[in-house]
Image (spheres, grey):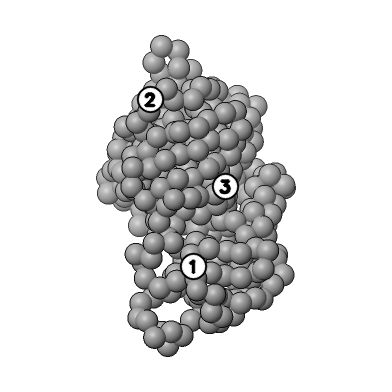
């Protein structure tokens, strides 16, 4: 095994990852993916390609280009819109990884003659007793294992993660040392391949507005919303409710979404009891090892930026599971993923369907 094709995004992480593979003696080529047919300040594929090309020129490696826009639309974006239209909060980055980066990209790389693919993800992997394990990245602020819980044994075994054991600060220093123009480029955030946007304005392009009432948890109508699909549980900004809506003080938060009556339920204060729950039900569990964890004591994230919370799986079958947390969790949002860990090993996850006390 000596030929690696790395996904080169135009960012600093994949550029440095490529340099590490070259140092390790691999024959390296790059592949730039275009997955969204739009050129704007949010989705700058042309600029990203130029940055990827410059890094490849510095490294002296060949770069290929491929367009997976149709596959991305069919398998990721349509699901993303459907979930929002149903009042849920999806995470397209997870589906993008399983369906595009580690399926379409992987197959394309293998067809080009690669022995394995590589990416600039902040995760690690290792093999033990014939089984592949996915491990958190060393830089916990950048760890991306949450987004990769949907990978299987074959996908992990066919991938290399060169920067999983490194800190972001080192990556930027190394990029500058190597002469990459993107050494101080802002980290990509927002929707996978689409960019950082005002999600409400972006969704309005695809989902018609459906105005309704904003209602306090006591049933008092205190405002209007443009459509409950544009909001998520725990959201504070952008509600358009003035502090004088009631006699109480404190910021307003989305507590729930009543899809039947098209009402956005809100309450005041980050510590509102309706924002915290100890149980959730989830569907479509996926286990990286192909089998559910046997341990009673686990940790889980209910969103990417959330802390790992101690929990246990109290009910489990092929299609569904129920989880009980040791402490109430803030703003559990149906449509998001719950991802399970045993220490720093990512075990798998499932799609959150509902929550309860």
Q: Describe residue 240's horizontal placement relative to residue 203 as left or right.
A: left
Which of the labelled discs sits on residue 265, or is there none? none
Residue 331, percent from left and from top:
44, 57
Check disc 3 and report the residue beneath it. 353
Check disc 2 and report the residue beneath it. 295
* Element at label 3: strand
Residue 81, percent from left and from top:
67, 56
Give the Cα distance between marks 2 and 1.
35 Å
- Seen at 45% across and 13% down, the residue is 130
Up/down of 199 relative to 276, above or below: below
**The image quarter in which residue 285 lies:** top right
Up/down of 221 relative to 329, above or below: below
* Element at label 1: strand
Residue 337, percent from left and from top:
51, 45
Q: Residue furthest top?
A: 129
Give the Cα distance between marks 2 and 3.
23 Å
Up/down of 82 relative to 1, above or below: below
Check disc 1 and report the residue beneath it. 254
């Amino acid at each position: 095994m000596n030929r690696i094709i790395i996904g080169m995004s135009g960012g600093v992480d994949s550029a440095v990852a490529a340099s590490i593979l070259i140092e390790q003696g691999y024959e390296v080529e790059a592949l730039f993916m275009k997955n969204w047919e739009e050129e704007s300040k949010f989705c700058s594929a042309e600029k990203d390609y130029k940055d990827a090309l410059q890094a490849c020129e510095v490294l002296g490696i060949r770069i290929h280009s491929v367009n997976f826009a149709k596959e991305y639309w069919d398998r990721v974006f349509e699901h993303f819109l459907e979930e929002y239209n149903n009042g849920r909060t999806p995470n397209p980055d997870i589906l993008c990884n399983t369906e595009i980066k580690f399926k379409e990209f992987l197959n394309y790389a293998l067809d080009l003659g690669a022995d394995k693919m590589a990416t600039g993800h902040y995760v690690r992997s290792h093999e033990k007793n014939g089984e592949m394990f996915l491990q958190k990245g060393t830089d916990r602020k950048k760890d991306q294992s949450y987004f990769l819980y949907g990978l299987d044994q074959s996908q992990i075994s066919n991938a290399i993660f060169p920067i999983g054991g490194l800190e972001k600060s080192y990556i930027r220093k190394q990029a500058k040392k190597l002469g990459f123009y993107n050494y101080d480029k802002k980290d990509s955030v927002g929707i996978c391949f689409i960019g950082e946007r005002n999600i409400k304005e972006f969704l309005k392009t695809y989902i018609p507005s459906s105005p309704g009432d904003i209602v306090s948890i006591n049933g008092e109508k205190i405002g209007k919303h443009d459509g409950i699909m544009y909001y998520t549980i725990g959201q504070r900004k952008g509600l358009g409710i003035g502090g004088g809506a009631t006699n109480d003080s404190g910021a307003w938060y989305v507590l729930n979404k009543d899809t039947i009556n098209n009402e956005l339920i809100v309450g005041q204060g980050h510590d509102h009891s309706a924002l915290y729950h100890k149980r959730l039900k989830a569907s479509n569990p996926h286990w990286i090892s192909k089998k559910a964890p046997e341990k009673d004591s686990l940790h889980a994230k209910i969103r990417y930026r959330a802390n790992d919370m101690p929990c246990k799986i109290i009910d489990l079958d092929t299609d569904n599971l129920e989880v009980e947390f040791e402490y109430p969790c803030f703003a559990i949002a149906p449509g998001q993923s719950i991802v399970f860990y045993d220490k720093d090993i990512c075990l798998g996850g499932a799609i959150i369907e509902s929550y309860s006390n």
